[in-house]
Amino acid sequence: MFSKKTISNGIHFFGESLSSMRSAAVGIWVKAGSSTETDGENGLSHFLEHMFFKGTEKRSYKQIAEEFDDIGAQTNAYTSKEITCYYVCAIKEKLMEGVRILADMFCNSIFPESEIEKERGVILEEIAMSLDTPDDLLIEKLAQKFFKGTELSRSILGLVGNVRGFKREDLVAYRNKKYCAENIVVAAAGNFDEGKLLQTLEESLRAIPSCGREHRYVKDSAWIPQPATFRLQKDIEQAHIGFGFPGPGMTEKGRYAFSIVSKILGGSMSSRLFQHIREEMGAAYSVYSYPSIYCQGGMLIIYAGTSPQNVEQVSEAILKEVRRMKQDGISKEELRNAKVQLSASYILGQESTSAKMTFLGRNALLLGRPIEEEEVLQNIGDVKMEEIEQLLYSIFDEEQMVKGTVVPKRI
């Protein structure tokens, strides 16, 4: 069972107490990501995430690292299109110390000019690394093309020109605009004393101001993905192929059926794409599909890495499987097996306090409520064949398909 409490400034706390564990994870979740930025701000959410580790009024960046290490805690942060999360994982006896350090970073970071310049270089290297990683580049470009005209088209890492030009006042202004009580939740999972944790959060986070209203992600009902193709050349050996198809968003009906379709198509070793393209054709080492689901929309991503001479053959084989699934549907056995795989994958993925906290925090922030394990498993089990059949036609619409390749320069 989950508990829900609210500290004095309106920040909601969601907790899952697990007395059988010897550790706990606590995360501070913010509705801030690349989709909450303007074009000129693109990259600020990610830059800001980096800067929270670079020193507070009481601690230098080195002291932050040393104090976390001294209590054996693990800490990190990440930015996505719709959220930013800062978290700490620690044994029960050291959890409050870890939370106090995390809260100090979150509330009292000072963003020194010297550290901004150093971190600017780090982020530019991170962007360069993603551009040098062909599968990352492919997926980023797929999202950009697929979600064109929407907030989801923006890069999480940001534009190079923006990152080079951001100033301290830009970071401060963006934090003040987005990091307000209505857009923040705290999630905890594991073995923790709720009373002590809430007291610590009250003392540490109560100064975070209200901005008057919560940011809400709304899907543009008029938006329809437009067909597009692209081809990029890089100094690489293997070719990389990607397809993007439309799917339901996080709050839409069909989310679980969408995951089942992806699982059957390319989400496991027994999936259609894996069996046909890797096992039967021997044309790819890596081939898979997965659902990318946001509040503002969803996309089914299909990926394959193959030899340059096999690009057309593998692309046609992927489309053949897509068309066959759309025309002929799936079997009862495939539906049953996919449900078992998804249920087991979910359960196995919830075996750590960090994973539980992540699932709890993301749902609490984006949906406004936690989702019980039994509800997830029930929703997977309740998917009917008729729902799958209806969804196949809306997903595999080639008039809304984006296709991209990243190939060696020599071809």
Image (cartoon, helix red, strand yellow):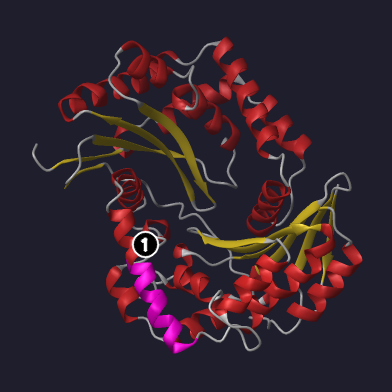
**Left/right of residue 209 with respect to residue 193 in the rendered view:** left
Q: Is residue 324 above or below residue 95?
A: above
Q: How many marks?
A: 1
Mark 1, Cα crowd under 10 Å, few <14 / some 14-19 / many 20+, is: few
**Is residue 309 visible to us here?**
yes
Between 107 and 362, the one lying in front of the other is 107
Residue 104 picture location, percent across and down: 68, 79
Q: Position of residue 4 (x, y in %)?
A: 83, 60
Residue 255 occupies quadrant: top right
* Amino acid type, mark 1: Glu
Image point (89%, 69%), residue name:
196
In the picture as drawn, the residue positioned furthest to the left comes out as 410
- The front one of 93 and 24 is 93
Q: Which residues are magenta?
A: 112-124
**Residue 212 visible in rendering:** no
- Taking the image as shown, residue 297 lies to the left or right of residue 146, namely right
Q: Is residue 7 magenta?
A: no
Q: Quadrant of the C terminus?
A: top left
Q: Secondary structure at mark 1?
A: helix
In the rendered image, residue 114 lying in the magenta stretch gets the answer: yes
Tell me where residue 129 appears, x and y as whole percent: 32, 56
In this view, the residue in front, 382 or 141, is 141
Residue shown at 31% from the left, 48% from the top: 133
Magenta region, main secondary structure: helix
Q: Residue at point 67% right, 68% down?
A: 68
The image position of residue 246, as x and y in percent, is 41, 39
Quadrant in which residue 406 is drawn:
top left
* Residue at left offset 58%, top offset 83%: 60
Mark 1 — residue? 126
Can you say whether 296 is above or below 228 in the image? below
